[in-house]
Image: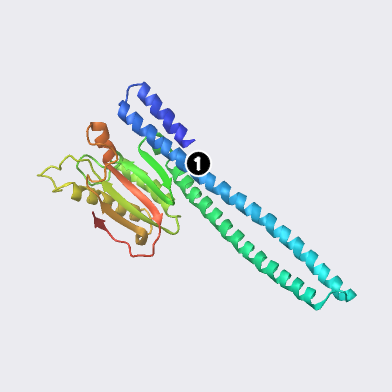
Amino acid sequence: MRNRLLTSLCAFTLATGCVTQGKYDTAMQRAQTLDEQLKGEQGARAAAEEKVRQLEEQVKGLEQEKEALTARLNTSEARLTSSAAERRGLEQKIAELTALNEELATSKRKLTEAKEALEKKSAEYESLAQSLKTEISEGKIELSELRGRMTVNLKDKILFASGSARVGKEGEAALKKIAEALKGVQGKIIRVEGHTDDVPTDPKGPFPSNWELSLARAMAVVRALQDAGVDPTVLSAAGYGPYQPIAPNDSADNRSLNRRIEIVLAPGTGTTTTTSSR
């Protein structure tokens, strides 16, 4: 639904002449990527559910076979018709079936846990998407998820004035919504990444280069998230300057795409959180 909304919004915007064809194509490509990611997660959940169902059927069949063998053993003992060798064979078969049953039960438990992990990750994604629904529909924020890594992409204009690292009022409101959603996230590290276009900074300004500007902006967002209640022990900041663009710096629209803040949620590693510039 979110991707269809983004596609419709992009098509409407292009039709009314508000954006360039390049920006529309970029938005459509990103929407298709999000749709493919969602389909992949749904396929993984369906595969896990099917595997659990198959294991449950195997366990049921093994239990029935075990009961039948146990009944045969009891009958053999009662009638004293079974030889000692047959008795040992039946006991060994029952032991093997019991061990296999336990192994299958363990596999079922692991698959169930994996399925729950997939659903939990999707729940985190949905929580963020619901909190930022207005900003996403307005094209100010993009949300994506791939292989356990979620990214909140904020356009620089929603957060900062040109050449500034001070978060504006609109940016503060958006970051408070994001912080509310991030407070409940468990087992993740939260890295704020600053990115710029390739236009040099003002030599008379406070930032000698885009390195310093990107890191200062990332740090400003980290402080805003901490002030809004996000655990500082899972926060970090990184500045990438103009060196990780998502579009060529060949037009005003593409440079606008490259000027961004990305809040990345990745699985926790247990290492100490650091603040860095790359």
Return the residue nearer the eye: 136 or 210. Answer: 210
Image point (36%, 50%), residue name: 264
Name the amino acid, label 1.
Answer: Lys
In the displayed structure, would residue 121 be above or below residue 260? below
Image point (35%, 29%), residue name: 24
In the displayed structure, would residue 197 be above or below residue 101? above
In the displayed structure, would residue 175 be above or below residue 19? below
Image point (33%, 65%), residue name: 272
Expressed as whole percent of the image width and height from the top left, the position of residue 100 reads 65, 65
Choose top left, top right, bottom left or bottom right for residue 200: top left
**Drawn side of residue 263 relative to residue 74, left or right:** left
Return the residue nearer the eye: 106 or 266. Answer: 106
Expressed as whole percent of the image width and height from the top left, the position of residue 218 reads 27, 50
**Drawn side of residue 215 relative to residue 67, left or right:** left
Expressed as whole percent of the image width and height from the top left, the position of residue 71 reads 82, 68
Q: How many numbered marks does the figure carry?
A: 1
Residue projecting furthest to the top? 16
Element type at mark 1? helix
Decide if residue 134 is in sight here.
Answer: no
Decide if residue 124 is in sight here.
Answer: yes
Q: Mark 1 = which residue?
A: 39
Return the residue nearer the eye: 209 or 69. Answer: 69
Expressed as whole percent of the image width and height from the top left, the position of residue 148 reads 44, 52
Residue projecting furthest to the left? 204
- The 10 Å Cα crowd at callout 1, few under 14, some 14 to 19, many 20 or more, is few
